[in-house]
Image: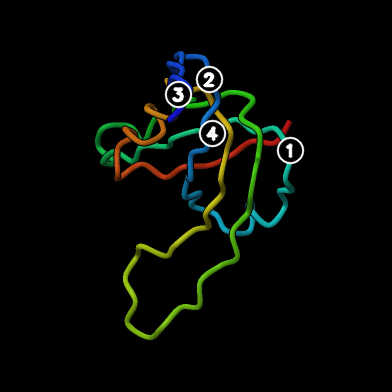
Amino acid sequence: HPAADPVRGRGPGELVRAPVRIADAATVRLLRPGDRVDVVAAEERSMSAGGGSARVLARGARVVRLPEPLERTPGEGSVTEGALVVLAVPRATAARLVGANPMARLAVTLW
């Protein structure tokens, strides 16, 4: 039996596909595969703390796929709020997207 090809290591700059739930579904409907976007996390704070803050999690991410929206069923929780988009990003950026505060609302700005 011939030996299998060795598995090549994956570098930190390699692009991976990262599914991201964007808070505003209407914004996602503006996107098309191939578009470039920045992903921004807006974190809400109490009104007494002076409002919320925002930080950029990804710059120039390429839209790869826009999955079809799921049908909502009565009584369904907040998991389906917003809309899903699949982005091609470097592995380190994908880790930032996944590690974003779950209470943060993610938004995109179009290039």
In the rendered structure, the answer to whether residue 98 lies left or right of residue 34 reads left
* CA gap, disc 1 and disc 4: 13 Å
Residue 35, disc: 1
In the rendered structure, the answer to whether residue 12 lies left or right of residue 110 reads left
Q: Nearer the viewer, mark 2 or mark 4?
A: 2
Q: Nearer the viewer, mark 1 or mark 4?
A: 1
Q: Counting residues from the N terminus, which is met first, the one under dot 2 or under dot 1?
A: 2
Residue 95 placement (x, y as % from top left): 37, 28
Q: Secondary structure at mark 2?
A: loop
Q: Which residue is mark 4?
A: 39
- Label 1 near label 2: C-beta < 8 Å? no
- Label 4 near label 2: C-beta < 8 Å? no
Q: Which residue is mark 2?
A: 14
Residue 91, disc: 3
* Quarter of the figure with residue 12: top left
- Label 3 near label 2: C-beta < 8 Å? yes
Q: Nearer the viewer, residue 30 or 85?
A: 85
Residue 90 placement (x, y as % from top left): 51, 22
Position of residue 62 relative to residue 30, above or below, is: above
**Three-letter code, disc 2:** Glu
**Three-letter code, disc 3:** Arg
Residue occupying the point 48% across, 45% down? 19
Residue occupying the point 65% across, 42% down? 64
Position of residue 3 relative to residue 84, above or below, is: above
